[in-house]
Image (cartoon, grey):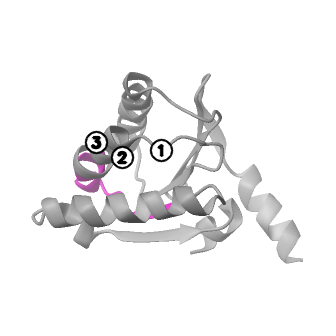
């Protein structure tokens, strides 16, 4: 029965952006935006362009949760992560996105790099809004929706 409910929840999402690097889906009634990266590496200019489009979606709706599915990634890019954490999250925070769920690749090295980078960003930027966010790491989209 849970499996049926999870599939139904996923059917409630509508595709807002479908490009080479990412697919972005929205569920307005639940206030959720889901961004799924589709490739193993996204150049920073394209990464920023995708997230700037997501910002427009955030501004137009009443969203409070952002799910970021990064399982396709096989490269870790520190400047992209810093921009995402320090600039993008700060901007969308003021439009209501305070809950962030992330789905990372299963590779231990990737998870370790993310945690090291997150700690470094937080230490070097003590005034950032990250402490005001509800950030959790999940294993699946279904878990991210439920959390």
Mark on residue 83?
3
Quarter of image, res 30? bottom right
Q: Estimate the x, y position of residue 28 in percent, counting from the top left.
A: 53, 51
What span is colored magenta in the figure? Answer: 88-102
Q: How many marks?
A: 3
- Residue in the picture at 37% in, 23% down: 45
Q: Which is nearer the eye, 107 or 46?
A: 107
Of tags 3 and 1, which is closer to the observer?
Answer: 1
The N terminus is located in which quarter?
A: bottom right
Relative to 16, does residue 81 appear above or below in the rendering?
below
- Residue in the picture at 45% in, 30% down: 50
Q: Estimate the x, y position of residue 101 in percent, counting from the top left.
A: 50, 63
Q: Estimate the x, y position of residue 37 in percent, counting from the top left.
A: 59, 39
Residue identifier under label 1: 76
Asked whether the residues under the numbered discs 1 and 2 touch, taking CB atoms below 8 Å apart as contact, a structural biologist would say: yes
At label 3, counting other C-alpha atoms closer than 10 Å, the crowd grade (few under 14, some 14-19, many 20 or more) is some
Quarter of image, res 122? bottom left
Residue identifier under label 2: 81
- Secondary element type, mark 1: loop
First-in-chain label (3 vs 1): 1
Asked whether the residues under the numbered discs 3 and 2 touch, taking CB atoms below 8 Å apart as contact, a structural biologist would say: yes
Label 3 – label 1 distance at C-alpha: 13 Å
């Amino acid at each position: 029965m849970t499996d049926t409910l999870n599939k139904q929840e996923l059917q409630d999402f509508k595709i807002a952006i479908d490009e080479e690097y990412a697919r972005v889906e929205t569920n307005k009634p639940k206030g959720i935006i889901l961004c799924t990266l589709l490739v193993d590496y996204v150049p920073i200019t394209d990464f920023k362009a995708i997230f700037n489009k997501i910002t427009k979606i955030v501004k137009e709706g009443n969203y409070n949760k952002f799910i970021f599915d990064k399982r396709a990634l096989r490269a870790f890019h520190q400047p992209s992560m810093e921009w995402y954490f320090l600039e993008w999250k700060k901007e969308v925070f003021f439009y209501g996105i305070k809950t962030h769920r992330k789905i990372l690749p299963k590779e231990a090295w990737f998870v370790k790099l993310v945690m090291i980078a997150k700690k470094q960003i937080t230490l070097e930027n003590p005034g950032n809004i990250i402490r005001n966010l509800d950030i959790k790491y999940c294993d699946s989209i279904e878990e991210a929706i439920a959390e």
